[in-house]
Amino acid sequence: MAETNRTARLSSRPTGMLQRDNFEIASEELPEPGDGEFRVRISHISLDPAMRGWVNDAKSYVPPVGIGEVMRAIAVGTVEASRNSKFADGDTVTGLFGVQEYAVSDGSGVIKVDTSKAPPERWIGGLGMPGMTAYFGLTEIAVPNEGETVVVSAASGAVGSIVGQIARIKGCRAVGIAGGAEKCAYVTDELGFDACVDYKADDLRGQLSAACPDGIDVLFENVGGEIHDTCLSLMNFRGRVAICGMISAYNATEPVPGPYNYRSILVNRLNVRGFIVFDFISQYPQAAKQLGEWHGAGKLKIREDVREGGIDAFPDVLNLLYTSGNFGKLVLKV
């Protein structure tokens, strides 16, 4: 067994894109569990757009990661050295373990998962928090009706890919927005969306209008910026907008202007609501059960983009999220 723990600790607040020197990568003493605790050997770490906001010293839905603290992250791994009766050595678990090789936990917020049904990385992707985010955002916030048009930005990503597939399961027309021909083909040919618009090509509004001839009833927003503005201009009367993320602005170094088509919210009497998955924490078991059933029945296809390099690669791999460098749920293999 290794006698050290490789960790990534926040060393400075970033300005713009994250830099390697914003983190200190170090080998530390292997943590030992106390009474009621257990140690987890982490195998995969979830890399999520929200991580950029977590390192800002600004008001948010969670306190910022402190200077010198291990970078916050959801991860999956195997329990070892357990002193907690609810978790046995060999259990595979997910939780907020951080960017490190080993973590000690008292079990709070930790979930056991079954790797006979899906590989470890899938439990921090489509069957984990990203899948639950998609599930609650669409079914609880947007509440689509059969036959409606649902538009999803970042449609090839961890959350967006699940949103569109659930929309199809609910009998809706699913239209994705993604970057590049390869990702658009994946969204339609593999995930089963009815159409996908390439935001990197010309005439975004013209493409979107053609893909949504009856307008947009539901917008699941992950990107913001020009894409959000364009979608607002095509919203139908009493449409719903679920705001999950605004990744286009996460690395901005100055205030980002609001949507120019804000008037559409008034004219079309839109229901616009921001949310985070933690809003529905009491309903996690319900979501996990439903996502698992759909996945087991072959109705939910999930793709991970697993990157090698371990803890040392963390800063560089994380930035792939903000440059459209990943294809599927971004995961760092430890």
Image: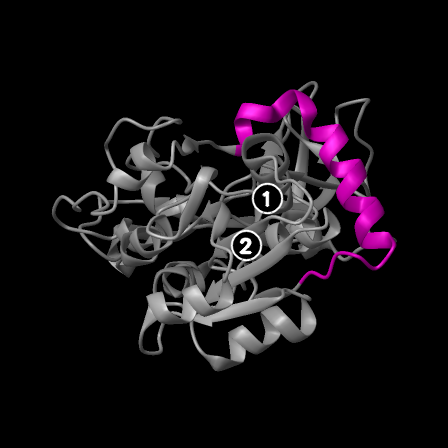
Secondary-structure class at tag 2: helix
Total marks drawn? 2
**Outermost residue, bottom side:** 181
What label does residue 73 carry, if any?
none
Dot 2 amino acid type? Gly
**Above or below — where is 197 with respect to 101?**
below
Q: Is residue 111 visible?
A: yes
Secondary-structure class at tag 1: helix
What label does residue 160 carry, if any?
2
Q: Is residue 151 magenta?
A: no
Task: Give the alpha-carbon distance from disc 1 to disc 2, as whole Å.
Answer: 7 Å
C-beta proximity under 8 Å, tags 1 and 2: yes
Question: Left or right: where does residue 121 sit relative to residue 184?
Answer: right
Q: Is residue 243 visible?
A: no
Q: Is residue 293 magenta?
A: yes
Task: Identify the residue under disc 1.
Answer: 134
- Nearer-the-camera pick, 174 or 62: 174
> Which residues make up the magenta segment?
277-302
Dot 1 amino acid type? Ala
Residue at 40 percent of width and 65 percent of height: 320
